[in-house]
Amino acid sequence: MDLFEAIETRLSVRKFKPDVPPLEDINTVINAARLAPSASNAQMWHYVVIYDTEIKSRMKQAIIESYDEIKKWEESKGFEDRIEYYKQYSLFFTDAPVNIAVLMEPKSSVITDLMKKKGFSEKEIERRRPHPDLLSIGASIENLSLAAHAIGYGTCWLTAPIYAYEKLEEILNIKPPYQLVSLLCMGRPDIQNIPVRHKKEISEILTVIK
């Protein structure tokens, strides 16, 4: 499969066959992830691959508890159905043969540090800081997802479970300077009918300044 075919045919997969990806294939996709561009070539990523069903079960329970706690908030009245949706959407990944936790070592720039010393507000700093660490992580995850697709696997990239990051980091024994920023599930797709993906046309997303 060439690069453009992989880009055009890759899709998020939420249902998997029970086949467990061998470590050799995991190494293949992680190798693709590590070759991604990163700000100042900092390579601020680390990947934790989870086969252990007990660990995945504990992760699932941690997410359930965290979202159920939100439902108890006074501010959550009227939003219970939406919170339940987010909770359920955050859980399916644990049914995949393999889970991949994406860790990031946060990076700060000299300019960001100087803005803080100058007294810029958090809002001003946030607007001026392009988050090169998170952008780098995104590039790495995209490499991983495309590589997985190229060798016959499906993946789904999730951030909703990160609400429970404290519990998840404890379960996975994640220590500073790293922090959990995303989760991926991976396995052989169990898809009967490939869904049609509705993507914007180039004319909708492109502006050319001559």
Image: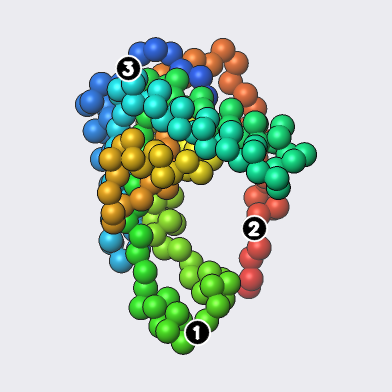
Q: Can residue 60 be seen in the rendering of this structure?
A: yes
Query: Looking at the image, is 104 positioned above or below residue 191?
Result: below
Of the residues under marks 2 and 1, which one precedes in the sequence? 1
Measured Cα–Cα span from mark 3 to mark 2? 41 Å
Q: Which residue is mark 3?
A: 20
Q: Residues within 10 Å of mark 1 (few under 14, many from 20)?
A: few
Q: Is residue 155 visible?
A: no
Q: Are marks 2 and 1 in contact (CB under 8 Å)?
A: no
Tell me the element at label 1. Answer: loop
Residue 206: mark in rendering = 2
* Amino acid carrying mark 3 in the image: Val
Would you place residue 57 above or below residue 208 in this image? above
Mark 2 residue type:
Leu
Image spot of residue 150 (x, y percent):
38, 30
User: What residue sits 64% from the left and 71% below the top?
Assistant: 209
Identify residue for label 1. 119
Above or below: residue 123 compared with residue 17: below
- The three-letter code of the residue at mark 1 reads Gly
Where is residue 67 shown, x and y percent of the image?
Answer: 57, 36
Q: Which mark is residue 32?
A: none
